[in-house]
Amino acid sequence: MTLIDVTVQVHAPELQDVEIATFVERVLELEGASLDLSVVVLSDEEIRQINREFLGHDFATDVLAFDLREDGQVGPDGEILVSIDHARREAGARSHGIADELLFYVAHGVLHLLGYDDHDPEERARMHARQAHLMNALGRTVDPS
């Protein structure tokens, strides 16, 4: 059984923890995968600090995904960190809901943990197409461009 732990560290009334957990479970089901995951909703400042500390990038970003699977490890298989501030800005610019934008980031993080990559244009297009497919399959709307 998959265990999904959701922590909202900032005020995010747009989406409840249980909605995020259910969404992740459904994404994993559609992908035919099982992972124990931690999902954390952060502010831009918090995600910027983590991005700087662990990846050496001194800027806020929409999503970070950390694969925590190691021999003998106790705890989740991976951690997905998403910025509610980024989601609020992008949702407004793209004319769709904040919840959909945030879940789009969550789907992105799950796909990274399942081996998808977005470092070159072809891989990015493939990953975004899969994200859009998952969002549509789960009744969510978002423009991946």
Image: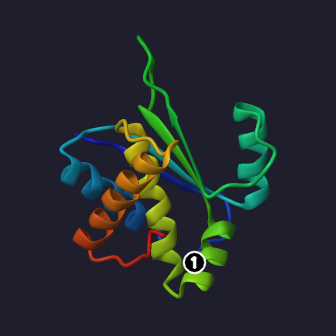
Task: Compare residues 39 and 123 and report the one nearer the observer.
Answer: 123
Q: Where 45 falls versus 136 (above or below)?
A: above
Residue 116: image x %, image y %?
Answer: 38, 41
Residue 18: image x %, image y %?
Answer: 39, 64
Residue 84, quarter of the rendered image: bottom right
Circle 1: residue type: Pro
Residue 31: image x %, image y %?
Answer: 22, 48
Q: Quadrant of the N terminus?
A: top left
Secondary structure under tag 1 reads: loop
User: In the drawing, does residue 13 fall left or right of residue 116?
Assistant: right
User: In the drawing, does residue 11 fall left or right of residue 67?
Assistant: right
Q: Residue at x 44, y 69 (%)?
A: 144
Q: Is residue 124 visible?
A: yes
User: In the drawing, does residue 17 fall left or right of residue 115?
Assistant: right
Q: Where 131 falls versus 2 (above or below)?
A: below
Which residue is the site of mark 1?
13
Q: Residue at x 43, y 42 (%)?
A: 112
The residue most toward the bottom is 95
Q: Where 75 falls versus 42 (above or below)?
A: above
Q: Is residue 15 visible?
A: no
Residue 131, quarter of the rendered image: bottom left
Q: Residue at x 61, y 58 (%)?
A: 62
Task: Compare residues 128 and 135 and report the one nearer the observer.
Answer: 128
Q: Residue at x 23, y 40 (%)?
A: 33
